[in-house]
Image (tube, rainbow, N blue to C red):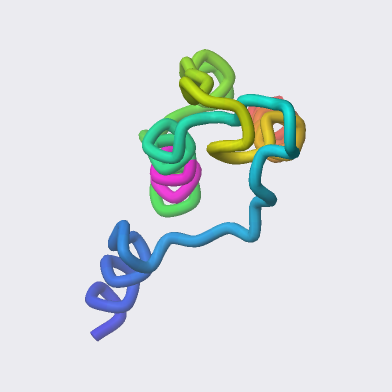
Amino acid sequence: MAKQLEDAWRDSDLLALPLPPAPPGERGYRPGDVERLVTLLADAVVDPGDGPGADDIAGLKLSRTFFIGQGYHAGAVEALRLAWVNELRRRQL
């Protein structure tokens, strides 16, 4: 039962973060790229020893959308990523 719950929250249909959309006049990060980031974060939580580390998360390439006003707010996504990278590096010490 516990394993099913652990796997269920990692389902891409259930992964969600309250990230704001790109502001008017700016191109945000592509939703698919942000979903990959969230999946990496989920994997880091489930398997802290062998899962992705700070360098994996920091090095993930995030692309901007083609049109302004689409995608996720880049500043918010980068703040989230930086917080995770800093915490994972702190735990490595």
Secondary structure that dominates the magenta span: helix
Task: Point out the image quarter for the C terminus.
Answer: top right
Residue at 61% over, 27% down: 68
Residue at 49% over, 25% down: 65
25 in relation to 47, above or below: above
Taking 49 as reference, is 80 left or right? right
Residue at 65% over, 46% down: 21
Q: How many marks?
A: 0
Q: What's drawn in magenta, residue-wise? A: 38-43
76 in relation to 12, above or below: above
Residue 84 x, y percent position in the rendering: 66, 37
Judging depth in this view, the residue of 41 and 28 nearest the camera is: 28
Taking 59 as reference, is 21 left or right? right
Q: Is 39 one of the magenta-colored residues?
A: yes
Taking 12 as reference, is 48 left or right? right
Residue 82 x, y percent position in the rendering: 72, 29
Residue at 47% over, 20% down: 66
Judging depth in this view, the residue of 55 and 33 nearest the camera is: 33
Residue 9 x, y percent position in the rendering: 37, 68
